[in-house]
Amino acid sequence: MINMDSLTAGDKMYIYGDSGSQGIYRDKALEIAKGLGLAMGTNPGLLRDYPAGTTGDWSDHYPFELKGIPYVYFEGNNWDTVKDGDYSETAKFGNIMHTPNDTVSFIEKNYPGRIKEHLTAFVKVLDAMLSTDIENQE
């Protein structure tokens, strides 16, 4: 399952995936990003409800995860903002998602070029992933 969610507002670009051996899709995506010179990371695991390399169980990927279907999840966020048991998408404005600031015009005005940068980077990684036989690599 490929989940592309909240891609453009966050300060940084992240890739998450399953825990254990099914995390191969996250790991391959991170490897591809690195090879392309793209600054992408994964959740460092600073919060109990967000284990390292994964994300919480409330997004679109979760029903697939429950069925044992591996997922890779692309997101714009900022794990460097973790404080008092929570985090926000941006250091400057906090969370943008689901607020009145959750618009293309707000993001472009306050972060010129971020939308294009993030979308281009995520699509490059996804394109390379879809061209790779990840399951049959040694």
Image (cartoon, rainbow, N blue to C red):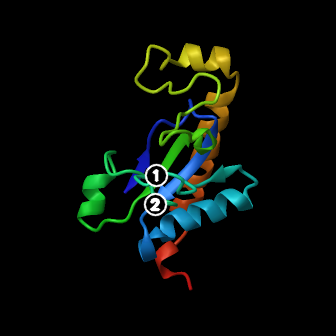
Q: Secondary structure at mark 2?
A: strand
Position of residue 43 in the picture relative to residue 117 (left or right): left
Which comes before the other along the chain, label 2 or label 1? 2
The amino acid on which the numbered mark 1 sits, given as a three-letter code, is Tyr
Instruction: Farthest residue to the front: give it.
Output: 84
Q: Give the residue type that dot 2 points to.
A: Gly
Q: Which element carries disc 1, helix, strand or loop?
A: strand
Quarter of the image containing the C terminus? bottom right
Q: Which residue was labeled with disc 1?
A: 73
For the N terminus, the quadrant is bottom left
- Numbered circles on residues, count: 2
Please report the residue visible at 40 percent of the width from the left and 60 percent of the height from the top: 71
The picture places residue 77, in percent across and down from the top left corner, at 56, 39
Residue 104 coordinates in the image, percent (x, y)? 54, 19
The residues tagged by marks 2 and 1 sit, at their Cα atoms, a distance apart of 6 Å
Q: Looking at the picture, does residue 111 appear above or below residue 37?
A: above
Of all residues shown, which one is farthest toward the right?
Answer: 37
Drawn side of residue 61 relative to residue 32, left or right: left
- Horizontal side of 75 relative to 49 (left or right) equals right
Residue 115 in which image quadrant:
top right
Q: Residues within 10 Å of mark 2 (few under 14, many from 20)?
A: many
Residue drawn at x 56%, y 39% is 83
Query: Residue at the spot x=70%, y=21% of the render?
Result: 112
Q: Please say if the residues under marks 2 and 1 sit with CB atoms less than 8 Å apart.
A: yes
